[in-house]
Image (cartoon, grey):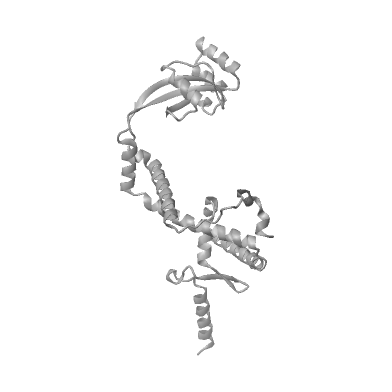
Amino acid sequence: MSMGLKIKGAAIACLLLATPLAAQDVTADTVVATVNGQDITLGQMIAMRESLPQEYLALPDDLLFNGVLDQLIQQTALAQIGEKSISRRDELILETQRLGYLAGIVLDDTAIAAVTDDALQAAYEAKYAHAAPSKEFNASHILVGTEEEAAAIKAEIDGGKDFTEIAKTRSTGPSGPNGGELGWFGLGMMVEPFETAVQALEPGQVSGPVQTQFGWHIIKLNETRMAEAPDLDAVRDELAAEVQEKAVMDRVAAVTEQAQVVRKDEGLDPAILKDTAILGE
């Protein structure tokens, strides 16, 4: 074989070695680094990526890859030191975290499986099928810090000044720049003193000073309407959350009831939970 062919063959071999692994050759167990002989796998990297805040996921792929790998290398090196001095307290904390994580997996799966078209339809019918139309209110308000200022504003409005313009210039609430408009709301959506005052008004009428934890309000009722039941699509997310919450609660109750539980806490003072010395150093 000529020297030229030998060199060309060696170059091809190097090129093949540098070629990335084919997708079908890569698994969660693919080793991406070792630290003092301990493997770090691609699966660990992917698991770490899934736990990152959303802002990190927007990073370029190469930057995120190297960042995650560097983090795992550092953690592994530090963990190897930590394992040599792990205390009983550490073991108990890790076991508690493990229990919480495993329980979370079961409940997440339960919540996801609970949201079906049939379940959403049943929840919708139970909540809205026989519900009577409810009254809704459209109101505006001017929010200020003292009763005296609120009373003075009410007097100005009674004297003919424009409610909207006063709200824009003097209301301290977030709706002020919009003329104090709060849009449509139903009963139970506003704090009680505010809601009570709104219910006592007729459309176009302006209240006297009304105090809530936010300050003093002058309220104008713009109009009212009777709201029919919303379409299912409009409340799908709300119903899904309710379906999931019930499914999770039912699963917890059922699993706990079926488990063979023997409590042995009789005679223990509940305050003993504060005694962290029991965990040791």
Q: Position of residue 128 (x, y in %)?
A: 33, 36
Q: Is residue 209 above or below residue 261?
A: above
Please tell me which residue lies in front, 257 or 3: 257
Q: Position of residue 276 (x, y in %)?
A: 66, 54
Please tell me which residue lies in front, 51 or 4: 51
Left or right, 150 with reference to 110: right
**Residue, x 45% and y 23% (percent of image)?**
139
Q: Position of residue 4 (x, y in %)?
A: 52, 85
Q: Is residue 162 above or below residue 11?
A: above
Please tell me which residue lies in front, 153 or 81: 81
**Residue, x 54% and y 61% (percent of image)?**
65
Left or right, 106 with reference to 7: left
- Residue reaching furthest front? 267
Any part of residue 63 in sight? no
Quadrant containing the C terminus is bottom right
Please tell me which residue lies in front, 30 or 108: 108
Q: Quadrant of residue 121?
A: top left
**Residue, x 32% and y 29% (percent of image)?**
132
Q: Is residue 22 above or below residue 50?
A: below
**Residue, x 41% and y 44% (percent of image)?**
241
Q: Quadrant of residue 242?
A: top left
Any part of residue 144 in sight? yes
Image label count: 0
- Residue reaching furthest bottom? 1
- Residue reaching furthest top? 159
Q: Position of residue 192 (x, y in %)?
A: 49, 26
